[in-house]
Amino acid sequence: MSKTATIAIDDKTIDLPVIVGTENEVAIDIQKLRDLTGAITLDPGYKNSGSCKSAITFLDGEEGILRYRGYSIEDLAEKSNFLEVAYLVIFGELPSTKQIETFEADIRKYTLVNEEMKGIIDGFPKHAHPMGILASLTCALTAFNPKVVDVEKEGDMYEAVCKIMGKFLVVATWAYRKTQGFPLNYYDNTLPYVDNFLQLMFKLPTGPYKINPVVLNAIDKLFILHADHEQNCSTSTVRMVGSAHAGLFASISAGVSALWGPLHGGANQAVLEMLEEIQKDGGDADKYLAKAKDKNDPFRLMGFGHRVYKNFDPRARIIKKAADEVLAELGVNDPILKIAKDLEEMALKDEYFVARNLYPNVDFYSGIIYRALGIPTEMFTVMFAIGRLPGWVAQWKEMRENKEPIGRPRQVYVGEPLRPFKEMSNR
Ligand code: SDX
């Protein structure tokens, strides 16, 4: 591979360094481009632009490969658990028994959320979307945890990681409890992390709550599959906000807002709403496939397509298999699962989708499992956020530890040239 890229513009020809990553990804380092040529690059949506070097997640969109810190998503989903994967993603290595026990014990030091936070929740209307509540509560945590993280101090960073892991899970479930008019539950420090998610969500003061191991295992696996995904929209947002040295809670809150978008994490809710609409409309998948292909119709096949994967999203494969298993184990016969499978089968044979490399992504099947597990549709993206938290934290930590500069893209101005002020009488 050449060590430089030559760029000729006007009467200038320059050589720019070429960087090759661990998995042979190639990048032209353009940090000196403007100084040497006066020109910048333009890349709306950053389809061709790398924002950073990162050692956390590797994905290959053409081959459908996803690895966290070098471990395949297939291995981690099958052999690990969410808290272990969170430790791996954030600290770089799979933990020993002692390390994971210490991590869980340290998280438990911060699982009590300040009671005054309940006053903030009281201010929301019952119909408020849980993602809006979660973004607000996450930022509000700053008010009760004002200490600025000194990333140079390992203990400071570690404490901040444990704090956000403990408190985010609690406030995420409070967003649901608020919309149901249920009392807010507390984290139970005698229970494991993902068991706590279930009791925080569903335990009622009127009786005991029994955790279903099938549900627990499925939720744990789904959180693993969402833990990180390199420089996606919400993670890039967390890095951008953090690059201004805004706090960790504020940066994560910004990530929650970005994830809410239906083109990103909000797609899992949009998929279910789409499948329910198709079901209500007689289950005619053909009709909706045609709508998705019609340029005059804004309808898109939610859960299909991906900025990077031009092959099956490996997570979708795992979730689809889990959906079959979980629904069978729970004895759930959900007709929309059949609609989803019909849609997938037809799209994978359809020229429009094949030509554009549009395959099911992580959001296509996750909602079907969440629904079977009793998670309400409006909470699907909150589930995504809980799973993605370790990735956001890891990427924020890496960006700060690498002392990356504040993010500030350039632009090409296409507005009015200089013009004289126009008096009111002339307007
Ligand atoms: C996530 O980045 C990540 O890693 C994200 C994520 C993560 O883990 O963080 O993986 C999670 O966000 C998954 C994606 C969830 N979103 C959806 O399922 C929404 C539906 N998908 C699309 O909106 C779309 O595919 C995107 C947003 C995911 C990707 O869009 P791109 O890369 O900007 O591609 P594009 O919009 O330029 O589409 C290319 C072509 C266009 O047609 P042409 O103009 O070439 O004729 O494909 C078409 C698009 O119209 N197209 C679709 C389509 N997705 C793309 N047509 C119909 N249905 C779709 N879903």
Image: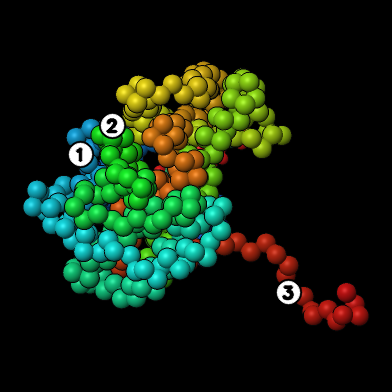
**Color theme of the render:** rainbow
Q: Secondary structure at mark 3?
A: loop
- The C terminus: image quadrant: bottom right
Give the spatial CA distance, label 2 vs label 3.
Answer: 66 Å
Give the spatial CA distance, label 1 vs label 3.
Answer: 61 Å
Question: Which of the marked residues, 1 or 3, is nearer the chain's N terminus?
Answer: 1
Question: With respect to residue 294, does 264 lie above or below?
Answer: below
**Residue 4 can be seen, yes or no:** no
Q: Secondary structure at mark 2?
A: helix
Q: Nearer the viewer, mark 2 or mark 3?
A: 2
Q: Residue furthest front?
A: 206
Q: Secondary structure at mark 1?
A: loop
Question: With respect to residue 241, does 60 lie above or below?
Answer: above
Using the image as rendered, state which of residue 50 and residue 380 is in the foreground: 380
Question: Which of the marked residues, 2 or 1, is nearer the chain's N terminus?
Answer: 1
Question: Which of the marked residues, 2 or 3, is nearer the chain's N terminus?
Answer: 2
In the rendered image, residue 385, in percent from the top left (x then y), is placed at 40, 50
Residue 418 image label: 3
Q: Is mark 2 within 8 Å of ligand 1?
A: no
* Residue under the point 41% across and 67% down: 117
> Crowdedness of circle 2 by 10 Å Cα count: few (<14), some, many (20+)?
some
Residue at which label 1 appears:
80
* Residue under the point 16% across and 58% down: 105
* Residue under the point 40% across and 45% down: 384
Give the spatial CA distance, label 2 vs label 1.
Answer: 16 Å
Quadrant position of residue 17: bottom left
